[in-house]
Image (cartoon, helix red, strand yellow):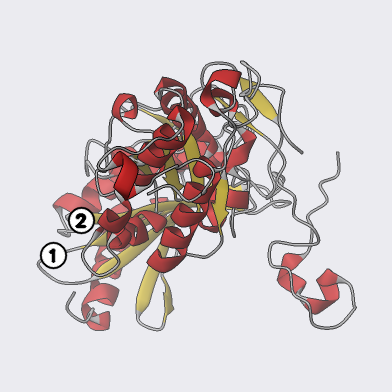
């Protein structure tokens, strides 16, 4: 893609802020990338419609979700927008709490959101209202967990759905990446391989 | 022709063009030199499997260039790639549809033991659902390694017990009927 234009991105972000008023927060600019947080999660569709129609962000390149385990609201959904005319990127974030765990779907604005939102539902458990076909996309129908949540272990949990699939715990043997150097604890050797202990 | 001298009693001056041998030896020889693979190519190892089938690392030398994608027409399943739990049912069903005698090569690290994917979504080795005859290490294994595995399997086929004593038809331990649920190797 062409190099993004930070000046255009900033001015477009400011235009969105002016158009949406107090629905969005202040602009956070980092190394030429502009992010805005949508403060009211029920107005996601509205803000995205302004971005698409008025500001010509006609391409949704990604919808992803973050699990801030321990924070409240727990989840955060990030929309990465791009405009093919003005070659500018924009990032919209919205926080979702664990209890309601629901957002309006933007599938009616950008059709690519269909599968992205299905993946978010599959991996994180956030439902999207108004989605045409919200079902699991990577795991199978009937899988009881949401694997990319922070309290789900990497090695998985044993499940069994006859005629469909089963899962089992994978033997981690000390961590996702096993090294042979030294004799210390894996957490000391490779801090990122720390085993997650949920408080249950 | 066959390797063992006790199975071939052949003297050109007496028999001419007739070779006397055992049915088992002949059938095993036919089988080993025409192992038709059912390529269960799931991931990157499938590329190396295709390379083994192409001209440089010719698998046709071993009679196995006939990659039959129908399980009914093949007798060797080469599981090449990561078997996810979601795909495991399909692999098991296709294995069940193959006719006896059948063999399985687990190609690559993912098919043998789950490979680098020690996670919630990857079956830790295809031998948890089907019996495997030969494991090939590598990520991906070189085509020559796959051909070496094929040769080892061919030796295995030849050295099997005679047909009519139930040897060939029980050339590996059968998994339990509900191998998908409960009978897992830990």
Task: Tell me the subunit letter for badge 1.
Answer: A
3D distance between C-alphas at marks 1 and 2: 7 Å
Residue A18 visible? The answer is: yes
Rendered position, B180 above or below A26: above
- Are dots 1 and 2 on a single chain? yes
Q: Quadrant of residue B35?
A: top left
Q: What kind of element bears circle 2?
A: strand
x and y percentages locating residue A16 in the rendered image? 28, 60
Left or right of A144? Residue B52 is: left
**x 41%, y 27%: residue:** B94
Q: How many marks?
A: 2
Residue nearer the viewer, A32 or A139: A139
Q: Earlier in the sequence, mark 1 or mark 2?
A: 2
Per the rendering, the mark at residue A84 is 1
Measured along the vertical axis of the image, is residue B145 above or below residue A119? below
Res. A102 in view: no
Name the quarter where the N terminus of chain A is drawn: bottom left
Nearest the eye: B149 or A147: B149
Name the side, left or right, on which B162 lies relative to A168.
left
Q: Please, what secondary structure does the residue beneath circle 1 have?
A: loop
Residue drawn at x 50%, y 43% is B158
The residue that disc 2 covers is: A59
Image point 76% across, 73% down: which residue? A191
Contact between labelled residues 2 and 1, with CB atoms less than 8 Å apart: yes
The chain letter under disc 2 is A
Looking at the image, residue B85 sits to the left or right of residue B120; the answer is: left
Which corner quadrant holds the C terminus of chain A?
top right
Above or below, A165 relative to B17? above
Where is residue A196? Give x, y as percent.
78, 54
Q: Which quarter of the figure has residue B45?
A: bottom left
> Is A39 located above or below residue B101 in the figure?
below
The percent position of residue A157, horizontal first and vertical second, equals 71, 36
């Amino acid at each position: 893609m062409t190099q993004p234009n930070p000046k255009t991105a900033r001015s477009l972000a400011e235009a969105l802020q002016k158009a949406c008023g107090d629905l969005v927060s202040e602009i956070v600019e980092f190394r030429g990338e502009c992010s805005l947080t949508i403060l009211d999660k029920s107005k996601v569709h509205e803000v995205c419609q302004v971005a698409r129609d008025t500001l010509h962000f006609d391409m949704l390149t990604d919808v992803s979700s973050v699990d801030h385990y321990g924070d409240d609201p727990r989840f955060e959904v990030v929309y990465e927008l791009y405009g093919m005319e003005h070659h500018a990127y924009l990032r919209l974030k919205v926080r979702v709490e664990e209890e309601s765990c629901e957002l309006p779907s933007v599938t009616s604005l950008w059709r690519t959101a269909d599968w992205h939102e299905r993946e978010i539902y599959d991996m994180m458990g956030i439902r999207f209202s108004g989605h045409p076909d919200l079902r699991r996309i990577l795991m199978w129908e009937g899988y009881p967990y949401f694997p990319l949540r922070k309290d789900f272990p990497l090695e998985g949990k044993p499940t069994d759905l006859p005629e469909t699939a089963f899962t089992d715990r994978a033997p981690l043997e000390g961590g996702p990446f096993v090294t042979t150097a030294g004799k210390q604890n894996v957490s000391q050797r490779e801090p990122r391989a720390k085993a997650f202990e949920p408080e249950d | 022709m066959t390797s063992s001298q006790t199975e071939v009693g052949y003297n050109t001056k007496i028999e001419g063009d007739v070779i006397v041998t055992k049915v088992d030896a002949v059938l095993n020889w036919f089988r080993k030199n025409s192992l038709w693979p059912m390529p269960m190519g799931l991931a990157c190892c499938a590329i190396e499997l295709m390379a083994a089938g192409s001209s440089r690392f010719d698998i046709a030398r071993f009679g196995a260039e006939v990659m039959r994608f129908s399980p009914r027409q093949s007798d060797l399943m080469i599981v090449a790639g990561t078997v996810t739990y979601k795909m495991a049912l399909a692999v098991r069903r296709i294995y069940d549809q193959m006719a006896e005698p059948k063999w399985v090569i687990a190609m690559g690290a993912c098919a043998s033991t789950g490979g680098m994917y020690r996670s919630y979504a990857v079956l830790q080795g295809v031998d948890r659902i089907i019996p495997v005859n030969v494991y090939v290490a590598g990520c991906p294994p070189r085509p020559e390694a796959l051909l070496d595995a094929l040769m080892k399997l061919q030796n295995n086929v030849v050295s099997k017990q005679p047909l009519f004593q139930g040897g060939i038809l029980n050339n590996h331990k059968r998994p339990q009927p509900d191998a998908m649920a409960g009978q897992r190797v830990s």
